[in-house]
Amino acid sequence: MIEYLLAHSPLIINIFEFSAALVGTLAFYKTKNPLFKSVALFLWFTLFVEIIGKYTWYLDDYSFLSSLKGTVFQRNYWLFNFYGIFQVFFYVLIFYTVVNTKLSNLILKSIFVLYAIAISIILIVNNDDYFIKYINDNFYAGAFTILICVFVYFYEILQSDKILKFYNSFMFYCSLGLLIWWLIFPPLIVYYGYYQPIYPEFIELRNIILMSVNVFMYSCFIFGFIWHKEQ
């Protein structure tokens, strides 16, 4: 069973991404909640990036793709490096729209600016690596930024009467999914060098964790879309 799931883990993750995007879209048309629209559009974009990113699998099958061989686009690192940065900016803006206190707004504005500065420096320092590998510092800076946003959101809930009905909020489940994903996935990057054929146990463990955290996060999104009740 585990072997079957691992063999189809990319498809399983895509199915959960598609389900979350579809449920979010239906939830928006039902409630007209602008938050649902933004998140659903982002989920569709995520699915699009995941699908487009698989073009590297078909370089030998299609002539129009074979021309990419020998170029910086032969691998898809550029696409996912871009997506990794884009998603952090997106989530910071989403959290900014849902927090209410001046302190929370100030913290999120500051973290947005700090992340923008940090990512600019990282891209300048690693400009030669953008097309040839995942830039690990992107993940570390992104993880720090997202976790700050989640903690600010949770702290605001604890300090307000929202704590009485937190379980009715989509953002609570969204934040929970993001918290687990960004706590677990970035540390995997540290051991990326061990994900080689001579270390099959590391590859299997990585794939199990990657599939699990993605399924959990998108399940949180789906449940939040369905369970959300207007506060």
Image (tube, rainbow, N blue to C red):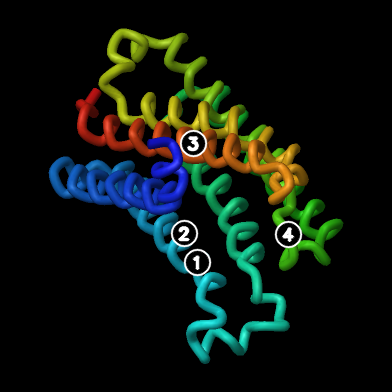
Q: Amino acid at mark 2?
A: Glu
User: As displayed, is residue 64 above or below residue 112?
Assistant: below
Front tag of 3 and 2 = 2
The residues tagged by marks 1 and 2 sit, at their Cα atoms, a distance apart of 7 Å
Q: Nearer the viewer, residue 140 or 111?
A: 140
The residues tagged by marks 3 and 2 sit, at their Cα atoms, a distance apart of 26 Å
SS at mark 3 in the image? helix
Residue 94's spot in the image, x, y percent?
A: 45, 40
Front tag of 4 and 3 = 4
Can you see residue 119? yes
Front tag of 1 and 3 = 1
Q: Which residue is mark 4?
A: 133
Please rate how many residues cluster around mark 2, counting C-alpha atoms within 10 Å: few if below 14, some from 14 to 19, many from 20: some
Q: Which mark is residue 96?
A: 3
Q: Quadrant of the N terminus?
A: top left
Counting residues from the start of the chain, the first of labels 4 and 3 encountered is 3
Residue at figure coordinates x 69%, y 49% from the top left: 116
SS at mark 2 in the image? helix
Q: Amino acid at mark 3?
A: Tyr
Please rate how many residues cluster around mark 4, counting C-alpha atoms within 10 Å: few if below 14, some from 14 to 19, many from 20: some
Front tag of 1 and 2 = 1
